[in-house]
Image (cartoon, helix red, strand yellow):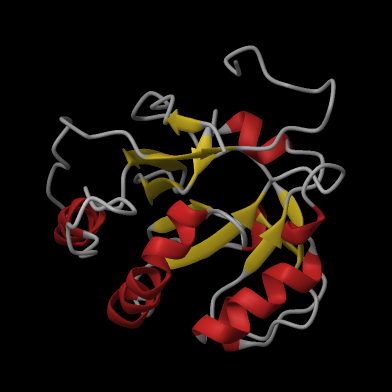
Amino acid sequence: MVRTVSTMLPLGTKLPFFRLEVVPKTSFCGVNKQEVVGYISSNDLENKPLLIMVICAHCPFVRHIESGITTLFEDYGDRVQIIAVSSNSLATHPQDGPDGLANQAQEQGWDFPYLMDPDQKLAKALKAACTPDFFLFSPAKNGEQGLRYRGQFDSSRPGNGELVTGEDLREAIDAVLAGSNVCKEQQPSIGCNIKWNPGKEPSWFG
C-alpha cells in the first residue's frame, strides 16, 4: 500500500466520455428507474449532478468509509447521480475483480451503479490517483457537466480517531443542489494508490 494524495483535477473540467461495464451480480435502479445490466455510458446520464467515486473492494481507506458512502447515498441518491468506479489492475489485484466488487456492494447494500474500468481510461481522464477519490460534476445551462468538487470524503482516516461524516463532500453537494458556489479551498483525498496496469502507469504516477 502506497499512501497517495489526489492530483486535484482543475475545477471546471468537463466530464470525460465513458462507457463502462456494470459489475455482474449487482442490482440497482439506473436511468429512468430501470434495472441496468451490461454497460453504462456518460451519454445515458440524466441532466442533474453526478458524483463519481473511484473506489475498490480491498483498500483499507475505502473500507474505512464504506458505511459513510451508504449513508451518503441514502441522503442524496434521489437528487444526485452516484456512480462507483473501480479502476485497479486485475493483473496485480484480482481481489478487485467482479466477484470482489459484487460482494462489497451486496454487503453494504449499495443500490447505485458499480462500474469496471479495466483499461483505466476513465481514471486517467480524471487524473484519479488514489482510492477513494471523489469527483462531483454538475450540468451547466448547455447541459455539459463541469467539475465542481474533487478531493476528500472528510478528514477521517484509518486510525486517526476522527468520525466518518462525509462532511467535505456533503458541503459541496449541498452547495451544488442549492445553486451556490462550491468553496474552492478543497482538500485532497488520501488513500491507496490506484494499481495501474503494468507498463501503463500515467505520467503523474510514482
Q: Residue at x 24, y 64 (%)?
A: 164
Q: Residue at x 18, y 31 (%)?
A: 184
Compared with residue 2, is residue 118 higher up or lower down, i.e. above or below? below
The foreground one among 7 and 42 is 7
Q: Look at the image and tell me in which quarter the C terminus lies.
A: top right
Q: In screen coordinates, is 198 left or right of 127?
A: right
The foreground one among 160 and 51 is 160
Can you tell which quarter of the image residue 91 is in? top right
Single out the residue that lies furthest toward the front: 159
Q: Residue at x 61, y 55 (%)?
A: 85
Q: Position of residue 114 (x, y in %)?
A: 63, 67
Can you tell which quarter of the image residue 67 is in? bottom left
Compared with residue 204, is residue 129 higher up or lower down, i.e. above or below? below
Can you tell which quarter of the image residue 169 is in? bottom left
Compared with residue 188, is residue 89 higher up or lower down, i.e. above or below? below
Q: Position of residue 79 (x, y in %)?
A: 33, 73
Single out the residue that lies furthest toward the top: 203
Q: Look at the image and tell me in which quarter the N terminus lies.
A: top right
Q: Position of residue 116 (x, y in %)?
A: 74, 56
Q: In screen coordinates, is 144 left or right of 35?
A: left
Q: In screen coordinates, is 77 left or right of 32?
A: left
The answer to whether residue 4 is seen in the rendering is yes
